Image: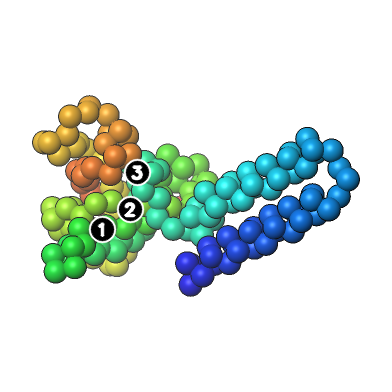
Amino acid sequence: MENTAVWLLILGYVLIGALLLITCVKSRLSGLYKVSLILLTTSFFFGVYLTMPKILGWPVARDILPNHFKLVSSIIYEPNGTVGDQGMIYLWAIDAQRARKNTATPRSYALPYKKDLHKKLVEAQNKVKKGIGQLGEVTSLEADETSTKLGQAQARNESIAINFYDLPDPLVPAK
């Protein structure tokens, strides 16, 4: 379904671009005006195409997982050697900083599969299903990491270590 939407968007922009090109060829506008119209249409196409994953809610591998986040849900795809699939872990999380300000919107994150993270996520997801909120904390990088910055490692799609903790029960005011 998502691929169909992207291809229809591309086809729509190609159609608009072709109609604009035909109009520019047949019109008596100045060359600079024609070129600027075509460049503007092309830039709009690339702008929409690049923001499409965020609009559709696809997981963002390029955005950095916050250091502290509330786990909403997760899906784990284990590696499959027969088809050459490396496996992937998808998290749906809320940034802890924004959660305090009540401006929290869950985001989807894609992380490379790691067996220890898989085990931790299964435990955390079971607690979430029981109603016990889970706070995730990005703690450190794997031993093979050469950079000291978490953000750089996540941008390169390297494995990171995450620990989960139970959130305290919210205080309900007395009646």
Q: Tag 3: residue type?
A: Leu
Could you tell me if the residues under marks 1 and 2 are in contact, i.e. CB atoms within 8 Å? yes
Residue 106: name its quadrant.
Answer: bottom left
- Which residue was labeled with disc 2? 110
User: Is 69 or 42 nearer to us in this picture?
Assistant: 42
Query: Residue tagged by mark 1?
Result: 88
How busy is the neighbourhood of tag 2: few (under 14 within 10 Å), some, or many (20 plus)?
many
Around disc 3, counting alpha carbons within 10 Å, would you say few (fewer than 14), some (14 to 19), or many (20 or more)?
Answer: many
Residue at figure coordinates x 53%, y 63% from the top left? 6
Task: Report the number of discs.
Answer: 3
Q: Residues within 10 Å of mark 1 (few under 14, many from 20)?
A: some
> Which tag, 1 or 2, sits closer to the chain's start?
1
Seen in the image, is 53 located left or right of residue 36? left
Question: What percent of the width, then of the height, locates residue 167?
Answer: 30, 50
Labels 3 and 2: the sequence-earlier one? 3
Foreground tag (3 vs 2)? 2
Which residue is drawn at the image coordinates 19% and 68% (left, top)?
Answer: 83
Secondary structure, mark 3, is loop
Q: Secondary structure at mark 2?
A: strand
Residue 136 drawn at (x, y percent): 28, 47
**Do callouts 3 and 1 mark residues in contact (Cβ within 8 Å)?**
no
Q: CA distance from mark 3 to mark 1?
A: 15 Å
Residue placed furthest toward the top: 148
Label 3, label 2: how far apart the Cα atoms are: 9 Å
Residue located beneath label 3 in the image? 65
